[in-house]
């Protein structure tokens, strides 16, 4: 069957909590779906499993598998997300993926088996199947090792890289990006969820060479640490600094209707006491069952997207779409309905230009 007669393929590139959100937003909109997931996570349950078993990080892959499940609310999908207090608070899905990969000798085979069990409507691909560690340098010159430390480090990041620096790309990930009609980068943590994919040479080449429309979803809000104080145009410039110049056709930017999105402040280095206090607050919140809010996470603020920033963005990227993606009681999350509408609008306009 000719490619143009198939469902158009949308590939979401990223990691963390933002990637499953995009997959859920695009379900039911006529897209064949796939996710390319960063493999540098070393925090929480995922990090403990990595250290104990020498396994690839299963957490973000698990979340994407559940988002793509035929029924994300099924007993099996909910069971995979269930955390076991008697087993180090690991999620059952993390343990299953890591153990199945060990049993079969292939992480990709393990992912495909879980896809089959869940009846997934799309595929999940690791960006690499090599064991990689993320390293970075802050804007005040400190070198940090490990995704967890980088994501909660003392200062805004300047640059990150992988160790080893040139891991082989997963062939399924490369094939998906090359054959895509739409590639979405983000939303998610810039230096720890999005950029690590682009640092894999084969993935970066596929992003440069694909004929797909490539959309970057700029994070809606910042939290203290890796991107503290960066404006929307600086997010794009960071992507360019990590090899993606010329790889972004459109940017979706959040700006609340009630303001200009100027609540950001310049980055600064945190004191040891501030880092410890925030770590304690995050640990406490991880035990709660209610959503994060501005009251309990005071270090959240909107990414700056004022007129000056947007003017610079339009010099950097062909299409800049500004919308209000506000989702009540979720300061860092995009409203999925509004997000799907914006993606559909930009991709539809792009297709009309190609006719």
Image (spheres, rainbow, N blue to C red):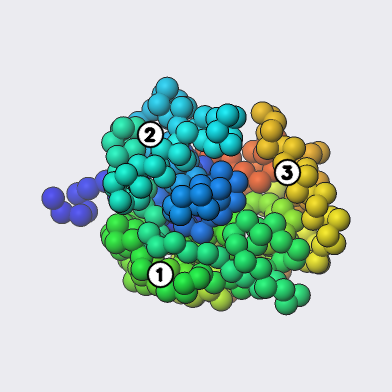
SS at mark 1?
loop
Q: Which residue is mark 2?
A: 69
**Is residue 23 toward the left or the right of residue 301 in the image?**
left
Mark 1 vs mark 2, foreground winner is: 1
Q: Could you say where residue 150 lies in the image, as x and y percent from the top left?
A: 65, 62
Estimate how packed mark 3 is, as few (under 14), some (14 to 19) or many (20 or more) residues with alpha carbons within 10 Å: few
In terms of sequence position, does the residue under pointer 1 or pointer 2 come before the other? 2
Where disc 2 sits, the SS reads loop
> Vertical placement of 199 versus 188: above or below?
below
- Residue located 45% across and 39% down the image: 95
Q: Are marks 1 and 2 in contact (CB under 8 Å)?
A: no
| Dot 1 or dot 3, earlier in sequence | 1
Q: Where residue 82 sits in the image (x, y, percent)?
A: 52, 29
Task: Examine the image and state in which quarter residue 156 appears.
Answer: bottom right
Find the distance from the CA under tag 2 to the CA under tag 3. 29 Å
Report the side of 180 relative to 283 (left or right): left
Residue 355 visible, this orientation: no
Q: Residue furthest front?
A: 52
* Residue in the image at 50% along x and 70% along y: 163
> With respect to residue 28, does 243 lie above or below?
below
Q: How far apart are the alpha carbons under marks 1 and 3?
A: 32 Å
Q: Which residue is mark 3?
A: 282
Q: Is residue 154 above or below residue 114?
A: below
Q: Which mark is residue 2?
A: none
From the viewer's perspective, is 87 left or right of 98? right
Residue under pointer 1: 167
Q: Quarter of the image containing the C terminus?
A: bottom left
Q: At which x and y percent is residue 93? A: 45, 36
Q: CA distance from mark 1 to mark 2?
A: 29 Å
Is residue 196 visible in this depiction of the protein?
yes
Residue extending farthest to the top is 75
Q: So how many labels did they put on this image?
A: 3
């Amino acid at each position: 069957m000719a490619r143009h007669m198939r469902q158009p393929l949308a590939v979401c590139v990223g990691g963390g909590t933002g990637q499953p959100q995009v997959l859920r937003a695009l379900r039911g909109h006529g897209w064949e779906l796939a996710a390319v997931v960063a493999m540098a996570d070393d925090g929480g349950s995922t990090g403990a499993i990595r250290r104990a078993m020498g396994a690839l990080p299963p957490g973000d892959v698990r979340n994407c598998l559940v988002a793509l499940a035929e029924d994300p609310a099924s007993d099996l999908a909910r069971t995979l997300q269930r955390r076991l207090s008697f087993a180090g608070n690991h999620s059952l899905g993390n343990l299953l993926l890591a153990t199945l990969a060990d049993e079969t000798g292939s992480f990709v085979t393990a992912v495909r088996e879980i896809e089959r069990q869940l009846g997934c409507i799309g595929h999940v691909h690791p960006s690499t199947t090599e064991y990689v560690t993320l390293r970075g340098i802050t804007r005040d010159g400190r070198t940090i090792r490990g995704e967890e430390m980088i994501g909660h480090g003392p200062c805004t990041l300047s640059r990150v890289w992988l160790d080893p620096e040139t891991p082989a790309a997963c062939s399924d990930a490369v094939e998906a990006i090359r054959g895509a009609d739409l590639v979405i980068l983000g939303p998610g943590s810039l230096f720890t969820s999005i950029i690590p994919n682009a640092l894999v040479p084969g993935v970066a080449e596929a992003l440069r060479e694909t004929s797909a429309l490539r959309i970057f979803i700029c994070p809606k809000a910042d939290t203290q640490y890796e991107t503290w104080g960066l404006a929307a145009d600086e997010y794009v410039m960071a992507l360019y600094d990590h090899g993606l110049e010329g790889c972004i056709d459109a940017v979706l930017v959040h700006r609340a209707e009630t303001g200009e999105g100027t609540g950001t402040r310049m980055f600064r280095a945190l004191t040891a006491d501030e880092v410890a206090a925030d770590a304690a607050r995050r640990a406490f919140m991880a035990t709660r069952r209610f959503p994060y809010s501005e009251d309990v996470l005071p270090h959240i603020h909107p990414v700056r997207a004022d007129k000056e920033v947007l003017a610079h963005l339009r010099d950097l990227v062909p299409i800049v779409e500004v919308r209000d993606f506000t989702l009540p009681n979720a300061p860092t999350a995009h409203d999925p309905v509004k997000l799907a509408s914006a993606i559909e609008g930009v991709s539809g306009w792009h297709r009309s230009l190609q006719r």
